[in-house]
Image (spheres, coloured by chain):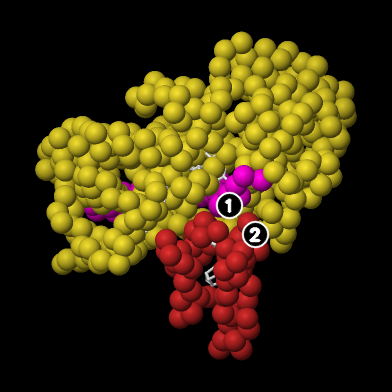
Chain colours: A yellow, B red
Amino acid sequence: MKYDVVVVGAGIAGPIVARNVAKAGYSVLLIDKKPAIGSPKQCAEGISIKVFDKYDIPYDRRYINREIYGARIYSPSGYELELRYNEVSGVILERKVFDKMLAYYAAKAGADVLARTEALDVIRKDGKVAGIKAKHEDEPVEIYADIIVAADGVESTVARKAGINTYAPPHEFDSSYEYEMLIEGFDPDLIHLWFGNEVAPRGYVWVFPKDEDRANVGIGIASDHPQTAKYYLDKWLKENNIPMKKILEVNVGLVPVGGFVKELVKENVLVVGDAARQVNPMHGGGMAEAMEAGTIASKWIVKALEEENLSLLQNYTAEWWEKDGKRLEGVLRVRRVTEKLTDEDLDLFIQILSGADAEKIAGGDYVEVIKALLTHPKVLMSRRRLSLLKELL
Amino acid sequence: MPEKIRVVVNEDRCYLCGGCAGVCPALAIEVHASGWEFFQDRCIGCRICINACPVGALSAEPLGVKE
Ligand SMILES: Cc1cc2nc3c(=O)[nH]c(=O)nc-3n(C[C@H](O)[C@H](O)[C@H](O)COP(=O)(O)OP(=O)(O)OC[C@H]3O[C@@H](n4cnc5c(N)ncnc54)[C@H](O)[C@@H]3O)c2cc1C
Ligand code: SF4
Ligand code: SF4
């Protein structure tokens, strides 16, 4: 088999690349090791409403479970901060349908798609990566391509076998565990987030509603923590008297939350999405980041093919770092500061903010949020809190 | 001196999520569609995978001390 481009991984980033490159008229093959693209899901399925227009994805009810109007945040002692918008701010997807439909859009645009096809290694010719050694069911297949895209998620096997350094230290991963379950008593128009060092070390517990009484209930904690994510989620459910007898799914995964890959391209191999550690380090959302990286990567793949000049691929690294990379490095700095907050700090900050100008907070005016915190006497009296907050300005 | 270990999986707990393969600095774990695989010769005994697994499916068996 010979293609202009082979894309390994049909999660979020892969199908976006495959669709965009196929649309430009080049031959593309998209492969995934799963027998059913999208299944099992490894996701809480929350995403901003903005992505549909921005990345030209139909707003299709087949993969939109629920529209969301904001968030409610809970501090360790139970103080609450609600951010509610008048309009829909995000949606909870059905990723099993969404991922498959993204692959369908790629196929409709002209790409070939092969499920149950696992990349095992790269093929090298004269020291260069010339394609992918794969397995389709029990048949070995060799796929040759001018350009190879590693969109293979957190495992990042293909990129690493091609010699791209995607290593990130263990502290830069979140270990995540989730139940899709029946759960009652939570406003289904909001996502719900619980913070606290005893609740979820470094991370948070989430309830993302899919129905009035059904939600993704999960947790992310630092992956170098000695206890498991499952231990903390089960503990939280028990402490909150939430019955665990109506569990529809169990989802497990690791989320890279830092350590963005420096060199996103090595000769004719590109790495995108979780494989490139392109995830928001604060909340662990990576779908929008995967779409953005896939869009930038596909733009330069098309240019490189048009001009028959593979060195143009390097512009993907440059453009990503200039746009998303810089922003996400900023978010990573904020995460490192918030990691130092004690439960008392979290209680106090959420208390202060729930009394502050909610409009500004909901509008994401981050400097205003810090200013609101900095004027409070309990912050002013603590040198430690002052210096932590000033690190954020 | 790093302890030489064999990483073992409890297949009944493992979800084949691929996380341990992703955090392993030595490409000593591969998670295939059909199963979990460990490569002893590549493992550097850092135990990162064991801590990271969200469900505690991995453990270590000692193999003696590396020179
Ligand atoms: C529990 C959990 C909750 C999350 N919640 C959210 C959320 O609410 N919102 C959000 O935006 N993000 C969330 N994320 C993160 C989000 O899921 C990822 O950032 C996103 O899916 C990244 O997309 P991707 O295309 O890079 O990789 P993936 O979606 O992981 O896709 C990679 C694909 O590659 C395939 N693959 C891997 N290796 C091979 C191989 N060798 N050969 C062939 N195919 C291969 C896999 O089967 C997979 O389909 C969550 C993650 C977890 C684990
Ligand atoms: S991290 Fe745990 S659950 Fe995931 S593949 Fe590895 S052993 Fe299995
Ligand atoms: S102990 Fe370290 S090197 Fe060995 S398999 Fe686990 S993560 Fe990889």
| Residue drawn at the location 59% of the way across and 86% of the way down | B63
> Which quadrant does the N terminus of chain A fall into?
bottom left
Q: CA distance from mark 2 to mark 1?
A: 8 Å
Label 2 secondary element: loop
Q: Position of residue A199 (x, y in %)?
A: 77, 45
| Crowding near the residue tagged with mark 1, few <14, some 14–19, many ≥20 C-alpha atoms within 10 Å | many
Marks 1 and 2: in contact by CB < 8 Å? yes
Is the CB–ligand 2 distance for label 1 below 8 Å?
yes
Is the CB–ligand 2 distance for label 2 below 8 Å?
yes
| Residue drawn at the location 59% of the way across and 80% of the way down | B5
Mark 2: amino acid = Val
Q: Position of residue A152 (x, y in %)?
A: 39, 52
Which chain hosts label 2? B
Residue A248 part of the magenta-drawn span: yes
Mark 1: amino acid = Val
The residue wearing badge 2 is B55
Instruction: State how many labels appear.
Output: 2
Label 1 secondary element: strand
| Crowding near the residue tagged with mark 2, few <14, some 14–19, many ≥20 C-alpha atoms within 10 Å | many
Residue A97 sits in quarter: top left
Q: Nearer the viewer, residue A222 or A393?
A: A222
Left or right of B60 in this view: A148: left
Residue A281 sits in quarter: top right
